[in-house]
Amino acid sequence: MTVTEAPRDVLDAAAVDTEPVSPTGLAALVGSGDPRSIGKLYVGTSLLFLLVAGVTGVLVGFEQVDIDQPDNILASDVLAQVVTLHSISALFLVVLPLLLGLALAVVPLQVGASTVAFPRAAAASYWGFLVGAGLMLAGYVANGGPYGGEVEGVGLFVAAFVLLLVALSTAAVCVATTVIALRAPGLSLRNTPLFSWSMLVAGTIWLLTLPVLAGVMVLAYVDLEYGTAEFLGGPGGLYNRIVWVFWQPAVYAFAIPALGIIADIVPVFAQRRLKRHGGAMFLIGAFGVLSFGAWAQVGLSAFDSPDTRPWLFELPWIAVSVAIVLPVLGLLGLWSSTLAAGKVRMASPLLFSLGAGAMLLVGVAAGIATSIEDLDLVLTTWQSAQTYLVLLAALTAGFGGLAFWAPKLYGNLLPENTARLVATLLPIGAFVLAVPYGIAGFLDQPRLLDATETAIAEIDEGGTVETLNRVSFVGGAVVVAAGVLGILAVLGARASRRQGPGDDPWSGHTLEWATSSPPPVGNFATLPEITSEAPLYDARHGALRDTTEASA
Amino acid sequence: MADTTAAAAATSTGTTEPGLEVFTGAPAPEPTRPRVLLVGTAFAAGAAAVAVCGLVALYAQVRTQSLASEGSWLPEETVIPLTPGNFGLLSLSMSLITAAWAVYALRNDDRIHAWLAVAVTIVFGLSFVTDTAYLWQQSGLVVGEQPQAVLIYTITGAHVAMAAVGMLYLLVMGFRSLGGQLTGRAAEGMEAAALFWYVTVAVYAVVWYTIYVTK
């Protein structure tokens, strides 16, 4: 046997040649498996789509300013498309990806993990989401969408929607798995930070909800492309198979992370521990369980059955609609007592949290009225107003999360004055949008998609309803303006060249504040001792106590 | 000289007896956690299961309404024979044992038997796919003519797709075990693939009862 050995200098040269070269530019972006980069991509794209949801929302609101004059600015077929684009983009292109993006960036830090579970799957989920969202919008352009006139366009919309749902579900798997399987040594599930816990609850509920919608969409696609289209029914039949996710109880599932964000922000700005961490976990879990709504699909019937909503006003639906207020009330109690017992430091994240909490409470409380059959509020703008409040609560909490964790995402804080303005305008705009719209629903104004001339003629208080719609339109415009300001604030933090705020500008309680801002690759060099849900609070106050004892 | 060096090394690493080194400076081992691939697979399998079960619920709902309003569900010329469904269920039931065998063999570092078990599981899976294809051929359901066909083809097709993913998962893990990437101490990949397969079989039990038995 002959053994040959290459000269040392040849080996060294070969080693230099084979050293991996880190990609830069677009290649680095596309090939990145870094959860922070993927999270920021999700957040950035969702804010871009916020403009789509905002513009379509303004068009929809303007259309209702004069209810006696249908087709104000949009023909009825276009109006139906714009309404569905507004609602679908608000939930699936804005709220869900914003919260998932925030979770992908923050949850690994909170649980002390070096990265997210399945980073390549997380990256694939983002690119799948982007392609799905692009194709879905292309489907609308090709006269597709739920009320589309072109079969190919509708087919493209449905297929893209399925891709979008699969992508979002994949991201949910990555986040939920991170919380369960990648927690740092010493961090028990009981001590998990509440945003991470809420993402575990939300991810689980979303994974029990979104695949059901995806399955129904596959069925719709088969029916549309190859079948008799009898399952879909007439115009709008496709949307009837989507709309249940915007109704209670399913819509509440998309606000679960909002509870976690608020629960993490409040104690930091109260400068004390959250009272009853375990209780807060239970309440968030209870809210999640009650918000599981895949069983309550609307439009289940086919073949023109008159019984189109068999689950409405049955005991389970009423019970869930009432019971879900309790966890929100319980959490509000915990947050209020924490704030009352602490030394409150007012800043934009807390302002966002207070606004989001108030919106969510009113949103879920409105659901009690919806469940009372005699009030006849289903399919009126009351229901739309409720959905607005819940989704805007989730959006506001998402902005609050961005304001809170901006140092970890962008290395800088959001401009505080702009952030405070957004935190003030968003809730005000949301209430001005939703309250008059809800009252108009109380006065029998049908939701826009059902606003036939007959239905409008049945509204007794035509003038009052129009006035309410105008006020509501102003509120919607304020929300859109606040959203644009919010986008500018995030861009400001991203582009800022000023000195960063330091690793822990808020004196945070949880592990993400134990590393640099932005975090290095691998997130942590060392981790502090973890014996509770607030290890940094422990370390800070333990050190303070030690110093006091030493000086005494 | 050699003894001095060995003594110095023993001091720095905490050697207590020849051949046994105790690294006193090393961090404590991480506590046992639920494993990442297994947990992720559990979530993914659950999501796939609810997608198919959601369709089954829709089938049951539409069928009930049709029976209430029209007194019938399937067209008269339609035949859904029980035999292929039963054979499919039998095949998948047996594949539960072989999938568990694959995990057991790998845990015992018996790669050859692990691979054999994976191969037999896949054969059972392919047998199930053949049974379903036979149903499609025999049923007389035409998607373009009967609305019931849309539901039945979508449900059975979705489940076949789930089974295909499960077989691919097992195949990949089988190859990885043959290649030495999965061992008795690191059999998580095979356990995860088997878990996905178990869920696939459980979902088939629901499909079998709804489509083949109650029709």
Image (spheres, rainbow, N blue to C red):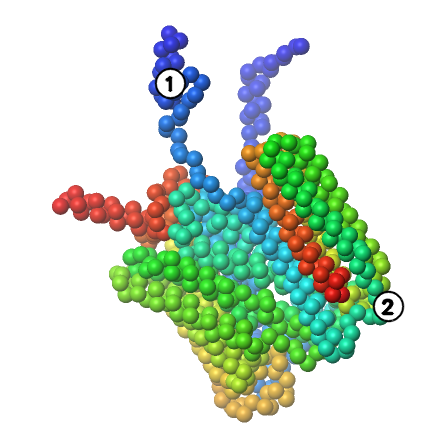
Q: CA distance from mark 1 to mark 2?
A: 85 Å
Q: Is residue A325 above or below residue A48?
A: below
- Write the residue at 45% across / 67% down: A393
**Pick the front one: A67 or B89:** B89
The nearer-to-camera label among 1 and 2 is 2
Residue with the mark numbered 1: B10
| Crowd class of label 2 (few under 14; some 14 to 19; many from 20; radius 10 Å) | few
Image quarter where the N terminus of chain A lies is top right
Location of residue A279 in the rendering, given as x and y in whole percent from the top left corner: 38, 60
SS for callout 2: loop
* Residue A47 shown left or right of residue A187 in the figure: right
The residue closer to the viewer here, B195 or A395, is: B195
Of the numbered discs in the image, which one, if any, rests on residue B77?
2
Q: Name the amino acid type tagged 2.
A: Glu
Q: Is residue A322 visible?
A: yes
Q: Position of residue B15 (x, y in %)?
A: 38, 20
Above or below: residue B193 compared with residue A4: below
Q: State the residue at coordinates (58%, 62%).
A: A209
* Same chain? Circles 1 and 2: yes
Does label 1 or label 2 sit earlier along the sequence?
A: 1
Q: Is residue A537 above or below residue B103?
A: below
Chain of the residue where label 2 is placed in the rendered structure: B
Question: Residue at the spot x=36%, y=11% of the render?
Answer: B4
